[in-house]
Image: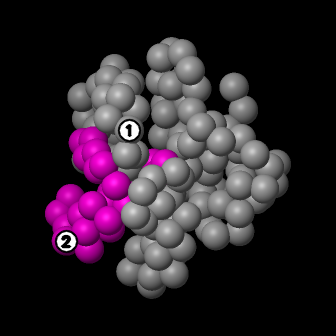
Amino acid sequence: MKNFTIFYTDDDEDDLSIFTDAVESLSKDINLQTYSGGEKLLNAIYHPPPVPSVIFLDLNMPGKNGFDVLNELKGSKENSDIPVIIFSTSNEPSIIEKCLNLGANYFITKPILMKDIVKSIEHSLTINWKEFVPDRKTFVYKM
């Protein structure tokens, strides 16, 4: 996993810290960039380096929320191929469906236990994003 860069956006400082701890427990070869809102994430994407290998995106944020960010990224020719993993507290079927329809690559309901957070991130990093095609059966991470 050399030169692997994760961008993670969440407006909750505790969630940013927990995610950081989880990623640090995985590998020293991962470059994690965290952002406290959708605007900051988009600014970083439009002004590289670094370039994300994958984006973990929270949905419920003030200003540009996760849906806005997802819609903008997937509507951009330059950035539409960046895998976007929704990392949300929601598990509502209508929200999951909306994310799939907007072009998200994967959906993870935020686990409560640290070991499960680590496991969910680790699993998502093993997916071959160039070949993975999400559908209703493969889109949502199952513990």
Name the spot of residue 18 as percent of width and height, x first. Answer: 37, 26
Name the spot of residue 35 as percent of width and height, x first. Answer: 29, 50
Q: Which residues are magenta?
A: 31-58
Residue at 32% of width from left, 65% of height from top? Answer: 39
Comparing 3 with 43, the one in front is 43
Name the spot of residue 78 as percent of width and height, x first. Answer: 38, 80
Position of residue 100 in the picture relative to residue 25 (left or right): right
Res. 77 image quadrant: bottom left
Separation of residues labelled 1 and 2 (CA atoms)? 24 Å
Q: Is residue 26 visible?
A: no
Name the spot of residue 104 as percent of width and height, x first. Answer: 60, 61
Comparing 73 with 12, the one in front is 12
Q: Amino acid at mark 1?
A: Asp
What label sits on residue 12 in the rendered view? 1
Position of residue 81 in the picture relative to residue 108 (left or right): left
Residue at 71% of width from left, 41% of height from top? Answer: 91
Considering the numbered disc 2 on the image, is that residue within a helix, a strand or a loop?
A: loop
The residue tagged 2 is 47
Res. 27 image quadrant: top left
Q: Amino acid at mark 2?
A: His
Residue at 38% of width from left, 38% of height from top? Answer: 12
Q: Give the label, 1 or 2, closer to the camera.
A: 1
